[in-house]
Amino acid sequence: MNNTRYFDMVEDHTPPTPGPLREVQVEFVTEALLGEELSVHWGVRENTRYFCGIGSRGTCFQMRLEYADGI
């Protein structure tokens, strides 16, 4: 899977953001293979969202998205 698809997965499966995106931190751990299913786990703390994509071989990616206060 192309690394940009992880951003699409995160964006497609989360509620609206609290404000504009301020900072992104991503760690690509291993690639997801064709046909592999991924589960995306996430949590929220203040204006920051944390994501972890897990496939059959373990963690594929970890992502932190920090948002500015709403406009």
Image: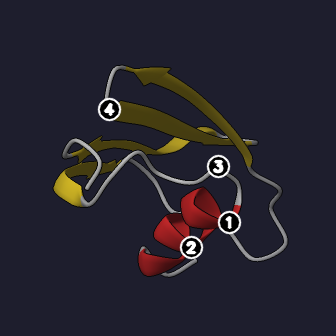
Among the two numbered marks 4 and 3 on one chain, the one whose residue lies closer to the N terminus:
3
Instruction: Locate residue 22: give its quadrant.
Output: bottom left
Say if 33 sits above or below 39 in the image: below
Asked if the residue at tag 3 contacts the one at tag 4, i.e. Cβ–Cβ closer than 8 Å, the answer is no
List the residue tagged with mark 2. Answer: 8
Instruction: Tell me the amino acid under the disc marked 3.
Output: Pro
SS category of the residue bearing label 3 = loop
What mark, if any, has residue 33 been given in the picture? none
Q: Are marks 3 and 1 in contact (CB under 8 Å)?
A: no
Between marks 3 and 1, how big is the CA–CA gap? 9 Å
Precedes in sequence: disc 4 or disc 2: 2
Which circle marks residue 12 in the picture? Answer: 1
Identify the amino acid type marked 4: Thr
Report if the CB atoms under discs 4 and 2 are less than 8 Å apart: no
Q: CA distance from mark 4 to mark 2?
A: 18 Å
Q: Which residue is mark 4?
A: 48
Camera-near label (3 vs 1) is 3
Q: Residue furthest top?
A: 45
Q: Which badge, 2 or 3, comes first in the chain's sequence?
A: 2
Q: Amino acid at mark 2?
A: Asp
- Secondary structure of residue under mark 4: strand
